[in-house]
Image: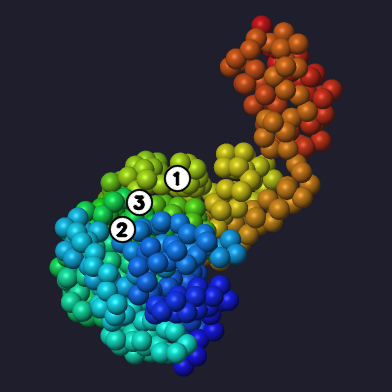
Amino acid sequence: MSIRMPDNVTEIMSRLEENGFSAYLAGGAVRDILMGKQPHDYDIATSALPQDVKRLFKRTIDTGIKHGTVTVVVNKTGYEVTTFRSDGAYRDGRHPDSVEFVSRPKTDAERRDFTVNAMMYNPESGILDYFGGRNDIKNRLIRCVGDAETRFKEDALRMLRAVRFSAALSFKIEEKTWRAIKKCAVLIKKVSAERVREEINKIILSDNPDYMRKLHECGLLQHIMPELDRCFGEPQRNKYHIYDVGEHIMRTVKNTPPDLTVRWAALMHDIGKPLCSSTDQNGTIHFYGHHRESGAIAVDLMHRLRMDSDIIRDVSVLVENHDVRVEPARAPVKRMMARTGETLFEKLLQLQTADNMAKNPIYFPEKKKRIDDAYTLYKEILAERQPYLVSHLAVNGKDLIKLGYRPGREIGDVLKRLIDEVIIDPNLNNREFLLKRAREYRVRRR
């Protein structure tokens, strides 16, 4: 089988081979090409030692030279070139204690995580598939190379990666590999928060973000996000819900667009419900104040995963407001826009739509119409550039100081009253009227 590779990759491999070394396209790129997908990156495995690679190419970066990896830069694009190697023991659960460079591609393939990632290719040899990767692609399976427990004890992140590839490729995890994940799940606690976060991001941005459910099923979630794990099995006995809290969250995430902020908000929006559950005399379960509890838990959890402060802030805003009913009228739409900001308002409506899709379908049409009508008004408000923030007013704090107001809270209160009037009637946003109203407020306060 012939595989078409980018010219830069062909150039790198050709130069290595011209100088007496073997070179193969390796890993995920081979898998993606066999599946008819465009690879995100192209990695090359070679018999050349790192110093040989550095000698043969003008621009190189010592990406992981201790483990045999040098990044070769061609036409402003970097390609990782890694020497065939055999790894020693992984005492820290991530890096091998020792690395031995070898000449045979099969020895290198033996250290890789999954069969679908262990294939190699070059035009002369064709595809090297020592462990049945092509057959696993055909059968849509994620299976470890060699003994699964050994692979996971070498690097516990591979358990999370198994679920990630399952989500990204819509593959099933092979039974022995699945059992090994369940047995070794506690080892995930050794993995850094940053590495865990990146895998979770890839899961929730995949076509199957609800595969987060698999993390619960195999025991990983209790060690990564215990707050989310305890949502599974938490009952919701009321007329609006037909799933337990965990399953409702999974279905909400599945219904959202592939936006990292929206999907994290969907994952977090009801995470506080187990702490807010109460049952009335009729046996109906309520979750009073769960939006505040969920927001607090979300912030703490995302900080633990070392997430960016901007996304933490945005997710917090969405979670806090996910249950607020936005009436389809200009004034309430503009007030919510002022609370969330322009971009987050649209994401809030996406979250609310997904949330309601994951509830009792009897009530969805009415809720969907209200949300759609609010969205239409939102677009009209933007198109007409209607004011909804204090900064949109035709006057500012300096103008009020000239009227005799003292700097501080007093000015803020007056500006808030003015924007409230302007939100109801945008025609009032003219300097003469607003200054007149500010004078009237000042007289009343005396």
Q: Quadrant of the C terminus?
A: top right
In this view, the residue in front, 193 or 56, is 56
Name the residue nearer the viewer: 153 or 407.
153
* Rendered image quadrant of residue 64: bottom left
Of callouts 2 and 3, the N-terminal one: 2
Closer to us: mark 2 or mark 1? 2
**Quarter of the image holding residue 299?**
top left
Disc sitting over residue 308 in the figure: 1
The kind of residue on which mark 3 rests is Glu
According to the picture, the residue beneath numbered tag 3 turns out to be: 194
Name the residue rendered at 36%, 81% in the picture.
119
Look at the numbered disc 3 and give the secondary structure of its residue: helix
Q: Alpha carbon of mark 2 to alpha carbon of mark 1: how far?
A: 30 Å
The local secondary structure at tag 2 comes to helix
**In this rendering, is residue 257 above or below 280?**
below
The residue shown at (50%, 69%) is 40
